[in-house]
Structure formats: C-alpha cells, structure tokens
Image (cartoon, rainbow, N blue to C red):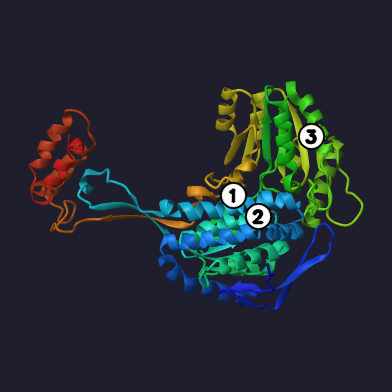
Amino acid sequence: MKLPSHSIIGNREIEGPRTITSFDPATGREVGAVTALDADGVGLAVEAARRAFTGWAATPVAGRAAILQRWLEIMIAEADEVAALATAENGKPISEALLVDIVPACATLEYWAGHAERHLAFQRVAPEQLLFAHWRLAGYRLDPLGVLAAITPWNYPVAIPMWEIVPALVAGNTVVFKPASATVLTGLALVDQARRAGLPEGVLNGVALPGSVTDALVDHPGVAKVFFTGSVGVGRHVAGRCAARLAPVQLELGGNDAAVVAADAPLERTARSLVWGAFMNSGQSCASVERVFAVDEIHDRLVRRIVQLTAELKVGDPTRRDTDLGPLTTSEQRDTVVAHVADAVAKGARVLCGGAVPDGPGWFYPPTVLVDVTDEMLLMHEETFGPTLPVIRVRDLDEAIARANDSRFGLTASGFTASHETAARLQRELAAGVVGINEHGIVAAGEVTGSWGGLGESGIGRAHGPFGLHEMVNVKYVFTDPGDDPAAPWHYPYDEDFAQFIGAAVPYLFTAGMAKHAHLRALASTRRFVERVRKTTLLRHLDKLV
C-alpha cells in the first residue's frame, strides 16, 4: 500500500503549498508528511466534486454499490497495513485497530453495498386525505443533496470517516473529506483505496488542510451540508459558520457518558465491561465510560474487581499484539488528562491505581481508577477523553439515574442489572442517544443498523443505519395527479356554491358516526361536488367514504 504524499482531488494527487507532518505518539518519530492545501485548493476540491455530482447521482444505486463491494475487497486485503498505519499515527494497539477501526469499516462497506437499493428505493404512500385519493403515485424519494463536506477526528481514523463517507456516496452525493492532521496519512489512504476500487473522478476528494484553512471548506457555497465529528468547541464554531449561510450541519461531539450499576448487577461482566469501555483506545472515545454510579450494596465489590482488572492491563508499545493500551494521540490530550486527575485529587478524590505520568518517550498515561469523586470535579462535568474511570457511590437507583442525567452531554449510557424490569427502566429513563444494558453504549458504534448521535452538547443529528442515511439525502415527497380533469374541487372561483361545498366537506371528512351521512348529503347537493369530484374514485375508497 503506497502512501499518498499529497491531497487527492479528482483521483489525482494535487500538491499544496504547505506541509502536514504526522508523528508516532508512542515514540515521537515522524511517520510521514503530506503537502497541505490552502483555500484555493479547497475550491479545486469542491469544484471537482460539483462537476462529478450530476453523473454520480445518475449512476444506478447498484452501480454505486458495486464499487463499494470492490472497496471492501481492497480493505480486507490491506487490513493489516491500514491497521498498522492507524496504530502508527493514532497510537492504539494494533489488535485494537483491527477491532475498532477495520471491522466497522468493513461492516459499513458490506452493509451499504448489500442494502442500499432497499433503503434508497421509492417509498410509496397512499394518500390519507380523501380529496387526493385519485392521485396515481405519491410517496418519498430519497435524493442526494450534492457536495458534502466530511471533517473527521483522529481517534478513529478509519471507522469514523467510513461511517460518513460510505452512506454519503451510495446515496449519490459527492464528498470532500478532510481527515484530522494527526492521522492525515490514514485518511488519504482511504481515498486512495476508493479510487483504486473504481470510484469516478471527483466523487471522493481527500484534502489535507491545516486547521486554519478548514473554514474555507465549511464556508464554501458549493458545499450542501457539513458533517463534523470532534470537540464541542470546534463543533460550535462549525455550526455558527454554517448558520451564517443557512447550510445544514450534522455534529457528533463530546460526551461525559455515564454507567449505572444496580445492586443486582452481574459483578464480573459489569467490571470487565466498564474497564474496557473506559480504557479502550486509551479512553479517547466520545462515548467512553467517564462516570460510574454504583449503588451502595455493590460499590465496594465492584471497585475491588475494577482495580484488579485495571492493574493487569499492559501499557506500552502499540505494535505488540499483547499490548492493551498505547499512548494518547497528542501531548495536548495527555495534558488534559493530567489536569483533570490533578483537579480531582486536589478536591479530595483518591487514586486507587494509575494517576502518574510515566518516564520515557511518548504520550503514555496509565489507566486510572478514582473514588471519592464529587460533582464539582472536572472529571464529572467535562469530557476527559483519556484513561480515567471515576466510580461514585449512590444510595439507590433513583439517585444513580438522576446524577447520570445531570450532564450537558447525552451521547451514550449504560445500565447493569439482572432484572428485566430495571433494564427497561434504565433504557427508558437514561437521557442519551444510545443506552446499553450489561454492556456500555459505546459498542453500538460498531452496529451499522443502529443510529448514533446524542442530546445536548453531544451534537445534532444521527449517523449510521436508515436514520443516518436520511441526514445525507433530500427526503422529497412527490405525487402525480392524472391531470385529466379540467379543474380540481379547490380551484377558483370561490363563490357561494364553493362555500357550501367546503362548509359541508370539513365536518364530513373529519366526523365519525351517523352524523357523517347528513354532511355527505349537503356535500353532494353542491354544483362543485357534481362537476369536480370523481365519483368512481370515491367508490374505490368506500371505507373512507362511510
């Protein structure tokens, strides 16, 4: 797999005037470099996507899906290489890169290659209104929007771009894709795979952009919609710029996700799920477990088991198959984790394991378990985005749910219990876009049919599955009137006869019971009814008539 050195626009590598260098967060060594575009380069990419749109939108869905199938075959063949590249740039363990980046990417390609025609097919809906019963065709088309911008983060440099790009393409849109600078090589490698799979020129364009140039993509009038995944602060900035030109935007932002542990929770399963949900990808997930509310009866046993499991985790070289946690991806992210833990300790929290920056190169930080955590600590209301696991003792389930919901975020949540009744209550009452029982909600990101998105500052809109697809299309209601009547009942002129007609039509159409028949007699006595209402159509809908 040859790594691109430049942005890919119209299936050709386009050199830019700047440079973005990628570094290995485990060693600090350079992984590679690409030239970066300026605002003029953004214009080239959007124009290439605009030119390609008409032809791509007219391509049958089966033809688009066939290219996705070829892309899947390339992804499978190059899985180890792509995972190794993601590990080199992001720092996650190589086996974890296969699990949380390559598997979801393959699943996304497979699903949309196999199911796009069904999801994008015309959805016929019979008119409910009796006045429109003569229409020959009515229903919903799902048409592409145009040129979409996809701006993605560094924490899942394969999975997140594929979640956005693949359904956008199969729906008939063209895409300008800006990968995160920290994982720019991985992002451009995906675009290279797509062009080798046979994607036509301009349909998918990968642009290496410094952060200072990204506004040129967000602001471009040729971009029909912006899809952004990242921090709340940058998301708010993107939304503001989109609002200025009334452009729609989908945002998948931060989280401070909670887990609620009932007294009857299965201890071993709960502890293992929480440890994985908190520390996978070194905690650099918008849906990581960041707050655990454990009912008093199980709190101490749960904490002991969590500490035991955490102490067994291996932190180190992410290229080794037996490494559990690699480094954080950037020094800035580790600084945030250090600051949050220091703030908690200063305010009375106890660190039961971890909690100290290790010696040596790389942005490593050990998995850290804390107790005696209180609501004023940063850990409890800010997104830490690192390997921390605060466990909070609560009196009962009522308190646990209330405190779990006391957040400006609402991406995922989880509940742990052996009771079907408690499980149903947790799924009903926890305020989040995804709620899992006996497994943290983060795993739902790997299910292509499950919607993904949150409440509050966790973002706007949904991704994945049919609801995610609807974010990428114009849901267009269409209908066909035969057009062989000289005039419809509601056409001009308004006169005394029409006033009698509509005056009888309202109670007739919307009244039930025997009173309906009296209104029908009044309706049928009008000239408008006699001359402009199709009696054969009414007879075909006798159930609505009576």
Q: What amino acid is at disc 1?
A: Gly
Say which quarter of the image contains residue 394.
Answer: top right
- Report the mark closest to the observer, 2 or 3: 2
The image shows residue 474 at horizontal and vertical percentages of 42, 57
Horizontal side, residue 530 vs residue 407: left or right: left
Distance, label 1 to label 2, CA atoms, is 10 Å
Q: In front here: 398 or 209? A: 209
Sequence-earlier tag: 1 or 3: 3
Say which quarter of the image contains residue 217.
Answer: bottom right
In what element is the residue under mark 2? loop
| Label at residue 2 | none
The image shows residue 324 at horizontal and vertical percentages of 78, 45
| Label at residue 373 | 3
Question: Badge 2, how many Cα within 10 Å: few under 14, some, many 20+?
Answer: many
Q: What amino acid is at disc 3?
A: Val
Q: In front here: 527 or 60? A: 60
Q: Which residue is mark 1?
A: 459
Q: Are marks 1 and 2 in contact (CB under 8 Å)?
A: no
**In this view of the protein, can residue 377 be seen by the observer?**
no
Q: What amino acid is at disc 2?
A: Gly
What residue do we see at 85% from left, 37% from top?
A: 351
Distance, label 1 to label 3, CA atoms, is 27 Å
The image shows residue 342 at horizontal and vertical percentages of 85, 44
Horizontal side, residue 446 vs residue 314: left or right: left
In the picture, the quarter occupied by the N terminus is bottom right
| Label at residue 230 | 2
In what element is the residue under mark 1? strand
Horizontal side, residue 465 vs residue 126: left or right: right
The image shows residue 279 at horizontal and vertical percentages of 75, 43
